[in-house]
Every structure is written in structure tokens, then in C-alpha cells.
Image (cartoon, rainbow, N blue to C red):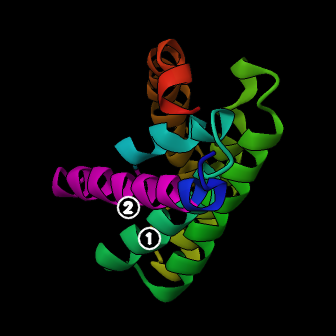
Amino acid sequence: MRNKKAQFITQAAMLAALYVVLTLFANGLGLANYAIQVRFSEALTILPYFTPAAIPGLTAGCLISNLLTGCMPLDVVFGTLATLLGAVGSYMLRKWKWAVPIPPIIANTLIVPFVLAYVYQFEGSIPYFMLTVGIGEIISCGVLGMIFMGILNKYRSVIFK
């Protein structure tokens, strides 16, 4: 019998590391921050469908990514909170595969625009930022995430025992 606690921690740590690597890659391309964000790491937000270890993994990955990419402290807090809320919501909706990417899309679309407007004082309105962040989240979570989910579903029994 495997040690389930060790497996949970290992999965969470690996997912956090993967989130960080993908965010740093997107940041290098100028896609991880600012008004228009297409973080490749956000495709991982479908992972709570497969394992609850994704919740702390994605949250820790977002926290570390935001620190490494030089985000302001309130962005680190609220960006990480958006990821946590999205991951918990995805886990809660795992019975409905098609609904799994909806919570992170909503959480980021509602929280991140206020960070952009009030923390970074970007020029533009909250509705504009909701549109730009929402489009980025739909691309990352909705499109890339669902493609990723389809691929992982084929190997579910091997990867997520």
C-alpha cells in the first residue's frame, strides 16, 4: 500500500513546479502579466478534475510564479486567491467535465481586473480589463485546458492512480 499523504504532497509539488515553469515561459514571451494575459500555466487549472492535490499545487505554483515575475504584493495575494478559488471551484464541478474550466475563468475575470486597475494603475476601465483578462482565461483555461484534459483523460489511470 502506498503512502497516500506522500503521494498527495509529491503531486502537489510537481504541479506547483510545472505551473511555475509554464508561467515563466509565458512571462518570457510577455504573456504572463499585464492587461492581456495568456498564461500557459492556467491550462493546468483543469487538474482538480483528476486530483485534489492540484488545489494546493496550483495555488503554490501561482504564488511562487507571482513572486518570481515581480508582481506587487497585493497582486501576489489576490492573484493567488483567484487561483485558489478557481481550483476549488473546478474540483467541486468535477462531475461535469465541461464545467471544470469555468471557476478559474470567472475567478480571474472578476479579481484580476481590480488588481490591474488599483494596484498597477493601468489606464483603462474595469470592464475593459474584465474583457481582456476574460479572453485570456478563456484561451488558457477553456481552450488549452480542455485540450489538455482530453489528452490526460486517455492516461488517467496511469498518471492519477
Image quadrant for the C terminus? top right
Which of 69/84 is in front? 84
Q: Earlier in the sequence, mark 1 or mark 2?
A: 2
User: Residue 91 or 140: which is nearer the viewer?
Assistant: 91
The residue under the point 48% across, 30% down is 159
Report if residue 113 is visible in the image: yes
Q: Is residue 136 visible?
A: no
Q: Magenta span covers which residues?
A: 9-36
Confirm whether the magenta stretch covers residue 72.
no
- Residue under label 1: 122
* Dot 1 crowding, Cα within 10 Å, few <14, some 14–19, many 20+: some
Q: Is residue 85 left or right of residue 151?
A: right
Secondary structure at badge 1 equals loop
Name the chief secondary structure element in magenta.
helix
Residue 31, magenta (yes or no): yes
Q: Bin the neighbour count of mark 2 within 10 Å (Cα to Cα): few under 14, some 14-19, many 20 and up.
A: some
Q: Are marks 1 and 2 in contact (CB under 8 Å)?
A: yes
Residue at 45 percent of width and 61 percent of height: 13
90, 106: nearer the viewer: 90
Judge from the rendering whether residue 6 lies leftward or rightward of residue 139; answer left or right. Answer: right
Query: Compared to 157, does 67 lie above or below?
Result: below
